[in-house]
């Protein structure tokens, strides 16, 4: 389970940063930066927080709601247009920088999930598999995923037929079938191969929405 060991190795204020949504065919990539208040965080919540991918949806949403009362949180995103223009890796790093800039205070250190360093106005340490090691990164992974999933479920009401209410934009069989039948929407990543392939078979009836 993640803990605060890595945070204690850094001096000053430390935030954890993680993103959600690098792999989907649609929607933005969303990042979160989280500075945990260890004094205010309930011990029960500290023991429950884990990599968001290991948690059930109900648990993620519960923990995300509770984190707002014991952490300082910043959220950033990069749009589909930015993903297509600068590529998904650079867009993810951009979302991370925006998340840190959205914090109420600039931290002295940022622990970043992964092995690529974003350009941040503080000292940075990348941590491969960080959401399983650092409590701050794990918290950021929860906030980022819950935020992005809610956005995609809201978009599902406007764009039925792609299954976003359950797949939140990932390349499931239902989503691919929707792409072939309906074509891509303005929220699809046109630089991703499955979306490009759908353009060969179908014009875009949703472009005006």
Image: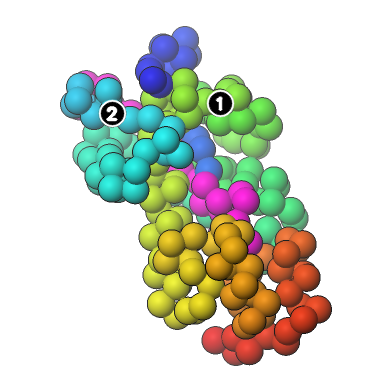
Q: Residue at x 54, y 62 (%)?
A: 169
The residue closer to the viewer here, 86 or 146, is 146
- Residue 166: which quarter of the image? bottom left
Q: Please tell me how crowded label 1 is: few (under 14), some (14-19), or many (20+) other residues with Cα within 10 Å.
A: some
- Residue 142: which quarter of the image? top left
The x, y position of residue 69, in whole percent, is 22, 39
Q: Is residue 198 above or below residue 3?
A: below
Which stretch is magenta? 20-40
The x, y position of residue 80, in whole percent, is 63, 64
In the picture provided, is 45 more to the left or to the right than 83?
left
Q: Residue at x 72, y 87 (%)?
A: 203
The x, y position of residue 145, in whole percent, is 44, 48
The x, y position of residue 3, in whole percent, is 38, 18
Spatial distance from mark 2 to mark 1, Cα to Cα? 18 Å
Q: Is residue 46 magenta?
A: no
Find disc 1 in the rendering and name its residue: 129
Which quadrant is the C terminus positioned in?
A: bottom right
Find disc 2 in the rendering and name its residue: 48
Q: Residue at x 42, y 35 (%)?
A: 54
Instruction: Judge whether residue 153 can be spotted in this image.
Output: yes
Label 1 SS: loop
Disc number at residue 163?
Answer: none
Q: Is residue 150 above or below residue 114?
A: below
The residue closer to the viewer here, 57 or 206, is 57
Q: Is residue 116 above or below residue 149?
A: above
In the picture provided, is 61 more to the left or to the right than 194?
left
């Amino acid at each position: 389970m993640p803990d605060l060991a890595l945070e204690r190795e850094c001096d000053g204020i430390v935030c954890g940063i993680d993103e959600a949504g690098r792999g989907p065919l649609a929607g933005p990539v969303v990042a979160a930066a989280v500075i945990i208040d260890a004094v205010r965080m309930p011990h029960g919540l500290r023991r429950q927080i884990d990599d968001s991918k290991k948690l059930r949806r109900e648990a993620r949403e519960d923990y995300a709601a509770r984190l707002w009362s014991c952490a300082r949180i910043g959220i950033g995103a990069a749009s589909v247009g930015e993903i297509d223009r600068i590529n998904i890796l650079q867009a993810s790093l951009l979302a991370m920088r925006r998340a840190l800039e959205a914090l109420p205070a600039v931290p002295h250190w940022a622990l970043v999930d992964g092995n690529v360093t974003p350009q941040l106005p503080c000292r940075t340490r990348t941590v491969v598999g960080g959401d399983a090691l650092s409590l701050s990164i794990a918290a950021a992974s929860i906030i980022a995923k819950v935020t992005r999933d809610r956005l995609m479920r809201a978009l599902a009401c406007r764009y039925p037929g792609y299954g976003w209410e359950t797949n939140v934009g990932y390349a499931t069989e239902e989503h691919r079938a929707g792409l072939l039948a309906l074509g891509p929407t303005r929220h699809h990543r046109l630089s991703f191969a499955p979306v490009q392939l759908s353009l060969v078979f179908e014009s875009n009836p949703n472009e005006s929405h």
